[in-house]
Amino acid sequence: MEHVGLTSEEAQKRIGQYGQNMVAEEKTSEIKMFLHKFWGIVPWMLEAAIIINLYIGKWAEAILIIILLLFQAVLGFYQERKAKHAIALLKQRLSVFAKVNRDGKWQTLPASELVPGDFVRMQSGDIVPADVNISDGEILADQSQLTGESLPVEIKQGKTAYAGSLITQGEAYGIVSATGAKTYYGKTASLIRLAEKPPLLQQLALKISKTLLILDILLALAAMIFMVNSGISFSFILPFVLMLLVLSVPIALPAMSALSVTIATHHLAEKGVLTARLSAIEDAAAMDILCIDKTGTLTENRPTVEKVASFSKYSEDEILRLSAITVEKENKELLNLALVQAAQKRGLLNGLKNISIIKNEPFDPRTKASGAWISYNKKKIHIMKGEPRSIAKLCGTQWSKIAKVESELSGGGNRVIAVAAGTGSKIDMIGLISLADPIRQDSAELVSFLKKQGIRVVLLTGDSKETAEKIAANVNIICSTAPENIDYEKVRYEDIKDYNVFSRILPQDKYWILKALQDGGHVVGMTGDGINDAPALRQASVGIATQNATDVAKSSAGLVLTQPGLINIQDVVKISRSVHQRIKHWVLGMITRKIAIPTFITLNLLIFKEFAISSFLAFIFMFFGDIVTFSFSKDNVHPSQHPNRWDIRQLTTKGIIYAISMILMGLGIFWIARYHNGLAIDNAQTIIFVWLVLVGGQAALYLVRVNQGLFWSKPFPGIWFVAASIFTIALTATMSINGWLMSPISISWFIGLFLSALGYLIVNNAMIATLERTAFKDASGLAAGKKI
């Protein structure tokens, strides 16, 4: 087939005429993105508080809430902007490429540079880069992302392959008919699917906050009834009730979650892991099964021919020659390259004047075979090569006749392919070729690490049972091998729950195996590199595309490795679990404060018939709390050695214990200040403000950041956390002692409050440490209870 493509000059002119081969994305201006931070339940409550305070003349409170609202908006905008830039960068690194004939030679160019009239080549594993009219060849294309059709569509000469389709089989040449927004579906830009599901941790925190909001509404109603019956002016009731409700909402939640995960993506990028879906980091913390392919992951993916065995009149050299000449020059598949290189090394491809290829037959995943019709010594010969059992079945050869030789050749985990040949419709098995693919030195280390972290490793491969088990044994995977007669499309979790090795599976079987494991309640990760891995990578909670993965695999995965092998998965596990620990600590601190503070303020009103703190000071406390809260995103933590699951019951129980003691101590301190020492109400409110900053904003956070043991043990607080604490405590002392924005208190009072906060920390830490050894069997979050 002859066809001359465009010249670079012609292509450049057409780009000016048609534009780049991409659909312009609808971009939100940064101004709109910033203004959006003032829209939602949490901003509405703060905005309502501003309006009400302005209406009743409380200008100071209104200004303070405005500052708090702006602080949250600016920080949230900054994090979202940084995340969007990171995703845009990732899209550039995962851009789709196309094989195009330019200036009379084949080149690999970014798909965005294609123009109508370009002559392109497409084969199994490619994404159709534009609308292409097929001029030669035939392909099966998966158009499910475009049309929802579950089965691949056959596209022959004269038909059009649409942009975004995934080529599952075959090879074809064609001319680009439309690009960018003018393609049939106009969705080229969506080839990199980075759609986000709501982060799991954010869903959890919002769910807890809704529950706490109900508690605070009940407290607000009780306070309103009491104040109305007491004849308190409406100008005092409304700000007080509003203060209770504002104290209950997770104002810092969006920025805190975004900050923690964004920091993690940067750390992973430094380790050679690109994050395509932010939710993959959260899911990786809970991953308890990782399904791994063999080729290119556990092995180095540089196969070399080791042995050839003949079953016919053909010599070993002839078998190797026939397997090599069926490989097209442009076929870069490593196994085929190994055959060609071995034949060239033996001089078997020199001077082949009596051999010519009539027709190639690309690899068919259904038969696990590829082949070609050739003219050899003036005879028309049909050659097939592929998986031994499949070739034996095509030839009608009894497996028992070659099983022993196949087993010997596959020793040590070698891959074995069979070669068959025939002059008519009947083909005969002529030999076997053994290819060695060395196991990566770091594979056993990775598997051992994952097992220590409570992650079960499952091997999925199309190789024989013998090969699979030898590879598994070499990398310390427990060799419990699944039977080869399983119908995976109908498989249930109970059928495969005890197996760690799956051999002779088809690419689509990976999807069904993974789905069955998920149905059993597991959080499953999956590594892959080929187009046929795409469905499983999408289905996986943590889809991981390897360094040499196809565009389709990378666009389907949540994480993309940029270095050979899988050793960087260790960093994924460690960093994701560290993020989980930090946000779990923050959630526990949030539960503690949002139970304790509104309840304390309401009980103080009902018992002492006085306001424990003014709304102005309450909002200053919220602002101070945020300073320390955000420093949590860089705190030092020990990642759990078990998969992390959320246990709301345990978190709530701990939060209630911390809250009860905080409430009782707060009531006691107010009574001492107001009635025992006879301080004025303004001074007593300053004392409660300082108490809340030191306990709710400091001691409670140092308390919740320790999973087990004592708060002064390792891991020590991070430098940013300590710096934020020192700054907040120093500022609180300065303001309260000098009477800035509040009535002054003595230095002795501040020291006494500091010591009482330290006592709160020590007593509660000892209490929880005791419970960790008794009631809480597993502080990592795997204890029985409701899991999220």
Image: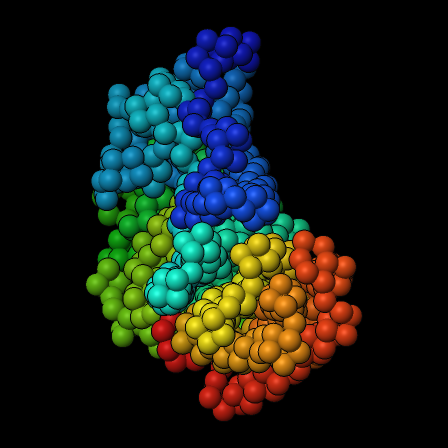
Q: Quadrant of residue 128?
A: top left
Residue 785 locus on image (x, y percent): 37, 78
Viewer-proximal residue among 561 and 394: 561
Residue at x 53%, y 56% (from the top left corner): 615
Which residue corresponds to the image point at 29% horizontal and 51% vertical from the top-left? Answer: 367
31 relative position to 483: left or right = right
Colour pattern of the rendering = rainbow
Left or right, residue 454 beside residue 489: right
Q: Quadrant of the C terminus?
A: bottom left
Residue 24 appears in the rendering? yes
Q: Is residue 708 above or below residue 252?
A: below
How many numbered circles are shown? Answer: 0
Q: Position of residue 342 (x, y in %)?
A: 56, 48
**In this orientation, does residue 379 appear?**
no
Tell me the quarter of the image containing the N terminus.
top left
- Residue 455 lies, with reference to residue 258, above or below; the image says below
The residue positioned 64% from the left and 75% from the top of the image is 678
Residue farthest to the front? 231
Compare residues 405 and 259 and report the one nearer the observer: 259
User: Residue 450 location in percent, x, y?
Assistant: 54, 71
Query: Is 206 rendered above or below residue 130?
Result: below
Q: Give x and y (percent) for residue 507.
A: 35, 54
Residue 412 relative to residue 517: left or right? right
Query: Which residue is located at x 69 percent, y 74 percent?
Result: 753
User: Nearest the camera: 178 or 42?
Assistant: 42
Name the one closer to the observer, 135 or 561: 561
